[in-house]
């Protein structure tokens, strides 16, 4: 599981607890936070993906499934591509959550978050629905969070993916239908980045962090998709299809 910008492995604590009775759950810990606080920050999406892909390539195991939220979705995509190149097989499925397709921009923000002043970046963090109110009220803790947060935003805001770059596994796209950062047409464009089946699931009333209130339904989707055989792609000339589903 690949966290969002500013997130950590513990961001998926509740999801890991719910899924671990059925699956072996591994949560990516980006450098410069929590138990990796002494590791140098990495502000490049492909470099972050490269480390994950290298670790997974050494595992002699069943193909993993990737779940990435927001920034984590494009890191998961790049890790899937690198793993596919290195081993000849990528993940069994990619769950791309809360993120426009790699070659499509998220809805723009001005100024770019990674160029904000510390004061503006702190205000941005406090406004996020994913920020624990206790964190927002702790000035010292906020100050310690700013460097990895800025590094993550620099990584995702400078990321560029050429149109047509693809992976071979099915893709399930999940997005809140009220997400101000991810227009639905840009979420649907994930179909351009897989040679397999692609589906778009929208969560009514959900914003960018729909994962919090929709926890149980997302868990059901993950369990269901990993328990079924891959759906055949539609014959559209490119072997791709997109289904719009309200879970």
Image (spheres, rainbow, N blue to C red):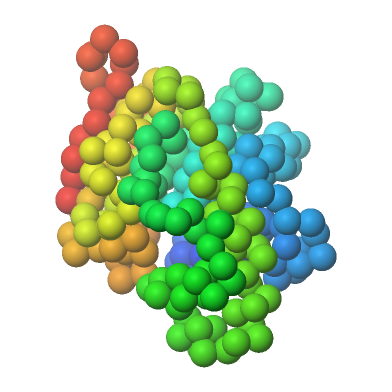
Q: Which of the 4 image quadrants contains residue 25?
A: bottom right
Residue 111 in percent (x, y) is at 45, 56
- The structure residue drawn at horizontal position 21% and vertical position 55%, both measured from the top left corner, is 177
The percent position of residue 132, horizontal first and vertical second, equals 47, 81
Q: Does 187 sit above or below residue 82? A: below
Query: How many badges with numbers are in the image?
Result: 0
| As drawn, 241 above or below 202 | above
Q: Residue 189: image x %, image y %?
A: 31, 32
Give residue 146's position: percent from left, percent from top: 62, 70
* Left or right of 81, for residue 94: left
**Which residue is located at x 73 percent, y 37 percent?**
54
Q: Quick check: 6 left or right of 68?
A: right
Question: Viewer-proximal residue, 46 or 96?
Answer: 46
Name the foreground residue: 117 vs 88. 117
Is residue 95 at all visible to an observer of this figure?
yes
Farthest right residue in view? 38
Q: Residue at x 68, y 24 (%)?
A: 86
Tell me: residue 133, above or below residue 106.
Answer: below
Out of 147 and 205, give the one closest to the viewer.
Answer: 147
Q: Residue at x 79, y 56 (%)?
A: 40
Whether residue 75 is visible here, answered yes or no, is no
Q: Nearer the viewer, residue 32 or 91?
A: 32
């Amino acid at each position: 599981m690949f966290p969002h910008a500013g997130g950590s492995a513990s961001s998926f604590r509740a999801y890991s607890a719910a899924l671990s009775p059925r699956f072996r759950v591994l949560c990516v810990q980006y450098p410069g936070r929590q138990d990796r606080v002494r590791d140098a920050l990495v502000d490049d999406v492909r470099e972050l993906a490269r480390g994950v892909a290298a670790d997974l390539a050494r595992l002699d195991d069943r193909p993993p499934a990737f779940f990435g939220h927001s920034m984590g979705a494009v890191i998961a995509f790049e890790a899937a591509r690198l793993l596919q190149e290195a081993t000849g097989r990528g993940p069994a499925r990619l769950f791309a959550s809360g993120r426009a397709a790699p070659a499509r921009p998220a809805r723009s923000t001005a100024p770019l978050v990674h160029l904000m002043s510390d004061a503006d970046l702190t205000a941005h963090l406090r406004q996020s629905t994913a920020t624990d109110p206790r964190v927002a009220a702790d000035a010292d803790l906020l100050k310690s969070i700013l460097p990895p947060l800025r590094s993550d935003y620099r990584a995702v805001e400078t990321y560029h993916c050429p149109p047509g770059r693809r992976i071979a596994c099915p893709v399930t796209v999940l997005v809140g239908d009220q997400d101000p950062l991810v227009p639905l047409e840009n979420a649907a464009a994930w179909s351009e980045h897989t040679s397999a089946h692609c589906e778009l699931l929208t969560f009514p009333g959900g914003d960018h962090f729909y994962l919090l209130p929709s926890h149980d339904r997302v868990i059901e989707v993950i369990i269901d998709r990993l328990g079924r055989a891959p759906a055949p792609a539609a014959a559209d000339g490119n072997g791709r299809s997109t289904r719009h589903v309200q879970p």
